[in-house]
Amino acid sequence: MPTVNMNYSYSSGISPTLPVEGYMQRHALKNVEPNLGYMKDAQMIEQPKNNGKIVQFFRYTELPAVTIPLYEGVTPDGQQLTETAFSVMTKNYGGWMAYTDELDLWHIDKKTKAIAERLTRQARLSIDTVGRDAICAGLNVMYAGANTSRGTIASTDILTYAIIKKVVRNLKIKGAQPFADGYYHGKISHETYYDLTNDTHWDDANKYQNKTREEKYLLGTIYKVKFYEVDNPKVFKAQTYLYGTTSSLDGANLSPCYNATTRTLTVSCTTMTSDLARQLTGMLVDVDYYKSTTHYKTPMCIERITWDSTYAYIQFRWTPGTTVTDEWTYAQSVKILPTGGGSGGTTPVHATLIYGQDAFGMVKLGGKGKPNIRIIVKPLGSSGDQDPLNQRGSIGWKVPFFCAAVIQDDFICRIEHGVSA
């Protein structure tokens, strides 16, 4: 057994499980998934084996009321569960930190704990942010105040009791079920919490002496909604570029450039690549168009992208109404733009989510078998002649094949609003 350095050895080029790797793996499993603020209440699915980069989520149609009585001795026809499948692309995420030979990986000391803490927090923030962006790409949206789009929202258009009541009413009409605690759930930012506590209808969780009522991150309630605090809220700000230095994608000069059957908009793009398609997939964008002389922007979520040498084919997760797509015919009438902020793009717009059961889902990180969050330790000397004196190694985290998605748009509503200064 050849000796690599004074701290450990390996045989056949494969290192044993180092104490810090096992420690960090346990630490990550314990602290990442349970503390994903946005992913609380998500449906969990396992990443299927040999399924490539795509997973499928399913939305189910509720059964109608039975109003015809049973006939004596006659068995009624059986019913079938109606489901709609949609595909979501999984992506890999990870980060790492280098260490030197001064760090002894056989001992869990203050420095190794600090590395574990920082990398774990980074993994949690990264996955929660990816999940946040996915579920904030839902297409059921309301705007605070008298606004009908994000672009006109001002900082004075704060979240109010009135719009919360309206959202709850709409969730009930659409059939969204509250959770077992009898409430719908909501995610709010620190600034939004500040505004809501000034509302006379706010019921603060901290005023109760019964500690069994308290839940992690629970702030309080308004009108059948429990609100939870998130540390990385979704805030829409002005964006100059859709990606890189590209500010927009123009609809192709075809008649038509939109296929309502496949939900696909053809755009002029000769530089589409696999990496770029992965970046854009799942993104919430604005589809910008004119009807006569009136300017419109419709929020859309990109589901999948294919391309050839001339065009890129953008498939959306939602099909807009006929009156909208009638206008999507030529390049001069439709563009894909990045989302922007309020008041013409200068005011940050906060997104508050209110939802019921089965609104969104994610690929599970833990669970049976090999966890989907992995700690990777590259020991000193593992780089061969790139590290001839066994001086450098690395510790990293990786979440392969992760994704999150809105499953039922009718069961989750995004309220876009301003916040007080």
Image: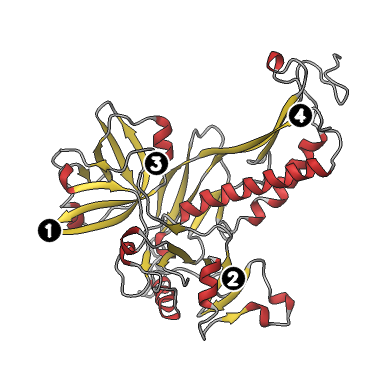
In this rendering, the label closer to the viewer, 2 or 4: 4
Q: CA distance from mark 2 to mark 4?
A: 50 Å
In this rendering, the label closer to the viewer, 2 or 1: 1
| First in residue order: circle 4 vs circle 3 | 4
Amino acid of disc 1: Thr
> In the rendered image, which residue does mark 3 sit on?
280
> In the rendered image, which residue does mark 4 sit on?
100
Q: Is residue 78 visible?
A: no
> In the rendered image, which residue does mark 1 sit on?
293
Q: Is residue 325 left or right of 234 when viewed as pictured? A: left
> In the rendered image, which residue does mark 2 sit on?
180
| First in residue order: circle 2 vs circle 1 | 2
Amino acid of disc 2: Ala
Find out whether the residues at labels 2 and 1 contact each other: C-beta distance under 8 Å.
no
Q: CA distance from mark 1 to mark 3?
A: 30 Å
**Point 59% across, 59% down: residue:** 37
Rate crowding at label 1 as few (under 14), some (14 to 19) or many (20 or more) other CA atoms within 10 Å. few
Rate crowding at label 3 as few (under 14), some (14 to 19) or many (20 or more) other CA atoms within 10 Å. some
- Secondary structure at badge 2 equals loop
Q: CA distance from mark 3 to mark 2?
A: 36 Å
> Which is nearer the eye, 245 or 143?
245
In this rendering, the label closer to the viewer, 1 or 3: 1
